Amino acid sequence: MADKELRLETKCYDAIEYGYLYGLNQKIPDEEFEKVKPYMKDFRRKDFADGIIKVTGRPEGYRCLEEDVPKVEEILNITNTLEKRRQKIEKAFNDPEEKRKLQDQSFTWLQTLFTRGGTKPKQDLSRLVVHSTKIYDPNNSYKDGKKDGKGSLFIYTPHGMWYIVNNSSEGSNKALNNVKTEDGGAIGYRLMYEDNVDMLIRIYTEENEYSGEKLY
């Protein structure tokens, strides 16, 4: 099997101080790594303001800040740069038809990844919200649909990323619910943090943060 293309990917999201931190997607020879080491820091739990209670993903290890990403990419001759990947999405978003296609495709992938690969631990929505690093509400679906038992959320927590589907409308099968809510429950799937899933969530939700009434 061919080697994966070398690139920098998001390793974690820190809600308090650093935002996204980046790391390499594979091991590289030591002499190559020595060249980029000045732009990276070997992060440990103690380096974060609150330990890691407001960090989603894998914070520990050699990571670089977003501002240093271009330098690391240049030194390692990385062609699939963060900027190129961003521009590709921006270009698609400038065309309404392309944007819709990209968002539909992203949602299809997300549904498959979460429902087939995710776990469904019993949880309480208010607890997830209290410990969250960020909450995306696609198209304000949860904010506007909450009273009717509808809508979905993507919640980033220290233990992973949750896809919450409100399942408390009249006639819904509440036996499927594993997440307790004040309205009657929701179905929640959890995946560990992963760069590609994070990107799909950000494309699909347009990074629209939840702005409805308090959920705890």
Image (cartoon, grey):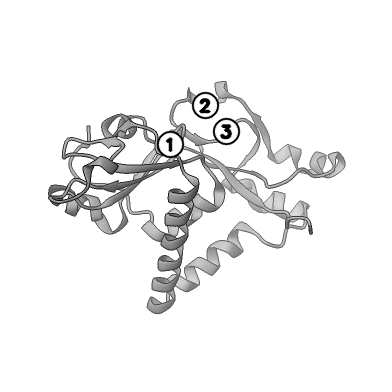
As drawn, the label of residue 59 is 3
User: Residue 95, how many percent across, how many down?
Assistant: 42, 77
Q: Residue at x 29, y 36 (%)?
A: 179
Identify the secondary structure beneath mark 1. Answer: loop
User: Residue 60, how many percent across, how many down?
Assistant: 61, 30
Q: In this view, does 43 lie to the left or right of 184?
A: right
Asked if the residue at tag 3 contacts the one at tag 2, i.e. Cβ–Cβ closer than 8 Å, the answer is yes
As drawn, the label of residue 48 is 2
Q: Quadrant of residue 47?
A: top right
User: Residue 17, how many percent across, how many down?
Assistant: 47, 34
Q: Name the residue under label 1.
A: 15
Q: How far apart are marks 1 and 3 (CA)?
A: 12 Å
Q: Disc 3 marks which amino acid?
A: Pro
| Within-10-Å neighbours for mark 3: few <14, some 14–19, many 20+ | many
Q: Residue at x 29, y 43 (%)?
A: 176
Residue 45 against residue 26 in the figure, above or below: above
Q: Quadrant of residue 85?
A: bottom right
User: Residue 68, how many percent across, how many down?
Assistant: 64, 46
| Within-10-Å neighbours for mark 1: few <14, some 14–19, many 20+ | some
**Pick the front one: 100 or 41:** 100
Q: In which quarter of the image is the N terminus?
A: bottom right
Q: Residue at x 48, y 52 (%)?
A: 113
**Pick the front one: 17 or 181:** 181
Q: How far apart are marks 2 and 3 (CA)?
A: 9 Å
Pick whichever of labels 1 and 3 is earlier in the sequence.
Answer: 1
Q: In this view, does 57 lie to the left or right of 182?
A: right
**Pick the front one: 158 or 35:** 158
| Within-10-Å neighbours for mark 2: few <14, some 14–19, many 20+ | some
Q: Is residue 209 left or right of residue 34?
A: left
